[in-house]
Each structure stands twice: as structure tokens, then as C-alpha cells.
């Protein structure tokens, strides 16, 4: 009888422990957004790894900054590091917009001398209101041919958030990343 009581207590403790376990996080990724293809871009375009404002550098999705306080989605996480994901997404978006160019990330296995280099500092990505997403990014483009030219500017982009919840936020962030690629493509092919 004593053995049964001890086994029952052990099973109850295990059941309690299993009940306290948190649910698995929901993982999200940004997707490419279609844009207008442009002809006449540089043959090889290198995209350096996107730099993030430190408050964005976390697995949890930061939805907004309101009155000095971050609103973080506790169990909604990015499926990969945000800087890595933004770099990959920028490469994909630019490749679609510049069909005659080879667009690649500098951190990968490809090592050719590019005619253009793209650098991005992502300063802000979050809700500017209940139905608006804001993205602010510093952009630097260095063109080597036909003559060396450097263009730097800050892109402040907004896009509507259609729907509610994290999926709507991520969809709007994907759209904003497409707008950023449009702005960069317009520098690469004026």
C-alpha cells in the first residue's frame, strides 16, 4: 500500500509538472513581396548583413514601443534571427526587382567583386498605431561602375496592418520590407 501511495504521488507530481509546462512558441517568418522589375541594374549586387536596433534583436516579436515600454509578443517568435531573415528577404526582394542582376548576401559562400553594395541599418519595426506598421531604415548603396557613387538616406515607411494579431503584423512587415526593396532598387536603377 505504501508503494502504491508513493507511485501515485510521483504520477501526480509528473502530471502537475506537465500541466505547468508552457506551450510551444508560434514561429513566424517574413515573406517576399512582389515589386516592379527594373532592367539595367548592376551585374552583381552584394547585400551586407542587415544591422538591427538592439531592442529588435531578440527571438520574441516586438510589436511596438509605447511610452518607453516595449510590447513583446511572449510566445510569438521569429523563426530565425531577425537580422538574418531581413538580409535573406532583402536579397530575395531585390533579385525579383532586378532580374538582370545577381543579388547575393555577403555572408554566404559567393565571393565575387560586386558592382554595387547595399547596407541597411533597421532602426524601427513596429506598430505606429493599431492599424499601421512603421519601418525606419538607414540605407547606404555604393555603386562602383561606371563611376564610384555613394547614396545614403533614411527610408521611413508605413503600411496598413490588415487584420489583428501577429499574423497581420508579420504580413504588414513583409509588405514594408518589399517597400524598402523598391526604394533600394530605385537607387540601383535610377
Image: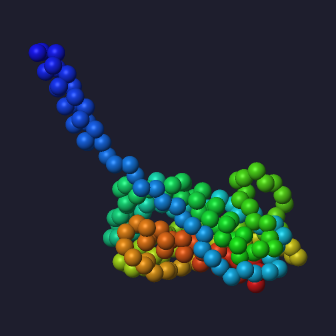
In the picture as drawn, the residue positioned furthest to the right comes out as 146
Q: Residue at x 64, y 74 (%)?
A: 181
Residue at x-position 79% and y-position 54% = 110
Left or right: residue 155 compared with residue 147: left
Where residue 33 sits: x, y (%)?
60, 74
Which quadrant holds residue 67?
bottom left
**Rendered position, 19 above or below 98:** above
- Total count of labels: 0
Q: Quadrant of the C terminus?
A: bottom right
Tell me the quadrant of the picture where the N terminus can be found.
Answer: top left
What's the residue at 86%, 73% (across, down)?
Answer: 145
Above or below residue 36? Residue 16 is above
Residue 53, given in percent of the width and then of the height, sits at 51, 62
Q: Residue at x 60, y 56 (%)?
A: 84
Q: Is residue 90 left or right of residue 162?
A: right
Q: Position of residue 125 (x, y in %)?
A: 48, 69
> 1 left or right of 134?
left
Q: Quadrant of residue 13?
A: top left
Using the rendered image of the protein, determine whether residue 91 is visible from the camera's viewpoint. Answer: yes
Horizontal and vertical percent position of residue 99: 77, 74
- Foreground of the two, 128 or 53: 128
Amino acid at each position: 500500500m505504501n508503494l502504491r501511495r508513493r507511485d501515485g504521488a510521483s504520477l501526480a507530481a509528473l502530471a502537475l509538472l506537465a500541466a505547468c509546462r508552457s506551450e510551444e512558441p508560434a514561429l513566424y517568418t517574413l515573406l517576399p513581396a512582389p515589386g516592379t522589375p527594373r532592367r539595367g541594374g548592376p551585374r552583381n549586387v552584394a547585400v551586407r548583413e542587415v544591422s538591427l536596433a538592439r531592442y529588435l534583436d531578440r527571438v520574441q516579436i516586438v510589436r511596438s514601443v509605447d511610452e518607453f515600454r516595449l510590447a513583446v509578443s511572449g510566445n510569438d517568435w521569429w523563426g530565425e534571427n531577425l537580422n538574418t531573415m531581413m538580409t535573406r528577404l532583402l536579397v530575395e526582394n531585390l533579385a525579383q526587382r532586378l532580374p538582370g542582376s545577381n543579388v547575393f548576401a555577403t555572408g554566404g559562400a559567393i565571393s565575387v567583386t560586386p558592382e554595387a553594395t547595399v547596407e541597411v541599418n533597421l532602426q524601427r519595426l513596429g506598430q505606429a498605431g493599431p492599424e499601421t506598421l512603421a519601418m525606419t531604415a538607414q540605407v547606404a548603396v555604393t555603386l562602383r561602375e561606371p563611376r564610384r557613387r555613394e547614396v545614403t538616406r533614411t527610408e521611413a515607411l508605413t503600411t496598413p496592418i490588415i487584420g489583428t494579431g501577429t499574423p497581420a503584423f508579420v504580413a504588414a512587415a513583409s509588405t514594408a520590407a518589399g517597400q524598402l526593396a523598391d526604394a533600394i532598387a530605385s537607387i540601383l536603377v535610377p
